[in-house]
Amino acid sequence: MKDYQIKLQKLFPYLLAMFICIYVTGLAPRIYGDTAYAFSNMMLMYGLPIASAAISFLYGSKYGFVWYFPLIFSVVFISTIYIFYGGDTGYFLNVLVYFVFALVFLFVGAAIFRKREFYKANYENKGKKK
């Protein structure tokens, strides 16, 4: 397999989780009618920032920092602004919030990844010296 295929294979489960979180939020009012607007608004305000933080943290703690990962979440949500929300410009603030949450928690996860790699390298070096 080529290098980009390996990267995409590692990224795919996290992308799938992102798509599910973002598109379920937008599709709920269309499927369930007016009763799902409260769910959709709650998810936009609280659920998607938590989801972007959790998904980014998990990816960062497993694979380290990747600069384009927070951008993917933002780009996917920008597409839903035009599909589900009629292109309302107020939702672009949500894009910024999701990007910041994803970036911060990706940094935190990447720091844990780096610390784990550091301990693993030191443990292997100590074993070789003896």
Image (cartoon, rainbow, N blue to C red):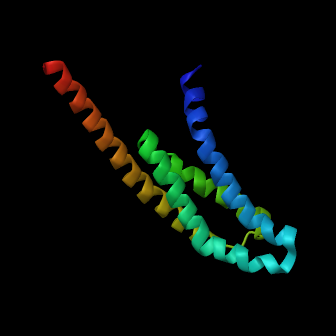
Residue at the spot x=41%, y=59% of the render?
Answer: 104
Residue toward you, 127 or 29: 127
Residue at the spot x=67%, y=47% of the render?
Answer: 16
- Seen in the picture, residue 116 relative to 73 is either above or below; the reply is above
- Counting from the top left corner in percent of width and height, residue 17 is at 64, 51
In the figure, is residue 58 to the left or right of 110?
right
- The image quadrant that residue 81 belongs to is bottom right
Residue at the spot x=75%, y=64% of the render?
Answer: 82
- The image quadrant that residue 113 belongs to is top left
Q: Quadrant of the C terminus?
A: top left
Residue at the spot x=60%, y=34% of the render?
Answer: 8
Q: Quadrant of the N terminus?
A: top right
- Counting from the top left corner in percent of width and height, residue 29 is at 81, 72
Q: Is residue 95 visible?
A: no
- Counting from the top left corner in percent of width and height, residue 53 is at 50, 60
Tally of numbered discs: 0
Q: Residue furthest left?
A: 130
In the figure, is residue 14 to the left or right of 126?
right
In the figure, is residue 57 to the left or right of 11?
left
Q: Is residue 64 visible?
A: yes
- Seen in the picture, residue 29 relative to 105 is either above or below; the reply is below
- Counting from the top left corner in percent of width and height, residue 47 is at 60, 68
- Seen in the picture, residue 66 relative to 90 is either above or below; the reply is above
